[in-house]
Amino acid sequence: MSCRISELVLNCANPELLARFWSEVLGYVELDREDGAIEIGPEAGFGGLQPTIILSPSSNPRVWRLPLHIDVSPVDRDQDAELERLLALGARPADVGQAGDEQWHVLQDPEGNEFCLLRRRLEP
């Protein structure tokens, strides 16, 4: 028997902003709202192969780098085109000490949470 990741919870100051951002990045839809939290995920909803993301309101500011981050891979374009799309959605480049020759881009979402855009293209 094994487990599978079903949800990721991201504490944030502005769930509305991050729900819009991550829905656009991942092609997710809003699934639920409860007590200020917004759950987004694939149209199939909770329990599928892809985890849902719960954006939970928090007034505790992040003061150091998160021990967990999200990696995304392009599915219908190359890495350069996807990087342009993510930057247009509000992502920003992040410097976490990269050497400059990595095959991924380190970015931040609109609240400064780091995530990586990988080079490898996945099938949709």
Image: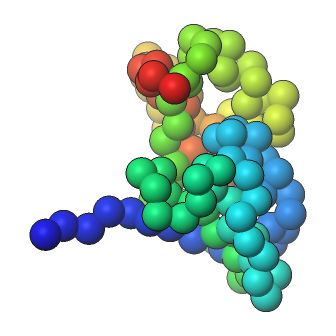
Between 19 and 48, the residue placed more toward the observer is 48
Tell whether 20 sits left or right of 5. Answer: right
Q: Which residue sits furthest left?
A: 1
* Snapshot quadrant of residue 99: top left
Residue 88 location (% of width, % of height): 84, 28
* Snapshot quadrant of residue 79: top right
Q: In this view, does 57 lie above or below 12?
A: below
**Residue at point 47% right, 51% down?**
50
Tell whether 83 sits left or right of 17. Answer: left
Residue 66 makes an appearance in the image = no
**Residue at point 57% right, 11% down?**
78
Q: Is residue 106 above or below residue 44?
A: above
Residue 22 location (% of width, % of height): 71, 48
Tell whether 74 sits left or right of 62. Answer: left
Q: Quadrant of the N terminus?
A: bottom left
**Residue at point 68% right, 60% down?**
40
Q: Is residue 93 above or below residue 23?
A: above
Residue 92 location (% of width, % of height): 75, 37
**Residue at point 70% right, 76% down?**
56
Q: Is residue 41 above or below residue 76?
A: below
Residue 14 location (% of width, % of height): 84, 68
Number of residue marks: 0
For the rendered model, the colour scheme is: rainbow
Residue 102 makes an appearance in the image = yes
Tell whether 23 sits left or right of 124. Answer: right
Between 123 and 77, the residue placed more toward the observer is 123
Q: Which residue sits furthest bottom?
A: 35
